[in-house]
Image (cartoon, rainbow, N blue to C red):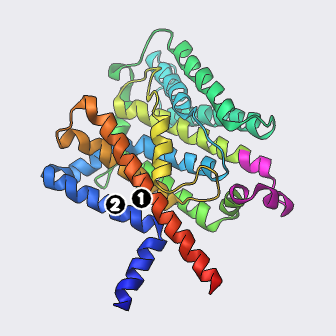
Amino acid sequence: MKENKSVLKKITDSREASLLIVLIVLCIVISLRSPSFMTLKSISDMLKNNAVIMIMTLGMLGVLLIGGIDISIASTLAFSGMSVGMLMKYGMVQNTFVLFLIAIGIGALCGLLIGLIISRGKVLPIIATMGFMYIYRGLAYIIANSQWASAENLGTFKDFALGSVLGVNNVIIVMVICYIIFFIVMKWTKVGRMVYAVGSNREAAQISGINTANVELMVYTVMGTLSGLCGALAVSIYSSAQPNMLYGREMDVIAACVIGGVSMTGGRGSVAGALLGSLILAIIAKALPLVGIEAIAQNTVKGVIILVVIVLNVITQRVMDKNNLKGREM
């Protein structure tokens, strides 16, 4: 009996454990309705098609941890993706590695500019990123000049998303590498500790000698860098570059973080939670058509499921806080 209570306590004390249970239950329910869902190919396709959102969720984790927000990320992705698409269309650059570097560089500059406006200019993140959302999306349309890059213009670049190493798709490998790097940085490095410190108590962090403006600048630059990387990945995955790429999908990135237990007020969240949140979102997106829900109703059902998961997450957090208070009293 005591062992059962101990296991239950561990589950209620761990946000990630409760999310994992939700993830498993979702998979079981969907598999009962559609047995093909849990096949290796189905899982691989799901991860590849959602890798862009899953990678950007890491950047958003850092932004939300310091109490910020960035709604310009889909526009940054479109700007960087459209840039490399046009470079290939007009034969200026054809090397895949160089094109990825260009996209990453563009994204990093976009994030750096946002970070400077917020950290040095003291502009509210929601206002600054809203402005840049329109600016970067507009630049994507300007670069496109009423054109778009199709599969025939992309040469060997589109083959990157089709290639694999030891049977694992290249896009999935990039995503896994990003998660491993972030997990190490956020859990075991000084940089990770500074991000959490700024989000938990900015004034206390400043008093302890942390340059909060530099931390702020860093997280927005990293967010932009990942958006640039995802711009190149999106072009390769979908074999096209269009200025309206992933329009509105920044909300999916934020939703993945919130589902994963990342606090929008800062200081609370984890890479594991972000991963589980983005996986839950990916599974929902993949499952809705499989279980026969019509396209017109999918957003409504998706919203309801997200809301239920978030409510469960809030309840778990309250139980955790209550247990922590009891521990202090003892």
Relative to 102, does residue 40 appear above or below in the rendering? below
Q: Residues within 10 Å of mark 1 (few under 14, many from 20)?
A: some
Residue at image coords 21%, 52%: 30
Q: Does the residue at mark 2 contact the one at mark 1 (Cβ under 8 Å)? A: yes
Left or right: where 213 falls relative to 272: right
The location of residue 33, given as percent across then percent down, is: 14, 50
Q: Which mark is residue 22?
A: 2
For the question of whether residue 49 can be seen, the reply is no
Picture layout, residue 44 above or below residue 100: below
Q: Specify the farthest residue to the bottom.
A: 2
Q: Which circle, 2 or 1, is nearer the viewer?
A: 1
**In terms of secondary structure, where does tag 1 sit?**
helix
Q: What residue is drawn where x is 69% and y is 31%?
A: 128
How far, Cα to Cα, is label 2 from label 1?
Answer: 9 Å
User: In terms of depth relative to the viewer, which is nearer, 324 or 203?
Assistant: 324
The disc, 2 or 1, on the residue closer to the chain's N-terminal end is 2
The quadrant of the picture occupied by the N terminus is: bottom left
Residue range highlighted in magenta: 198-216
Residue at the image point whose x is 56% and y is 30% from the top = 76
Residue 169 position within the rendered picture, expressed as x and y whole percent measured from the top left: 33, 48
The residue that mark 1 highlights is 312
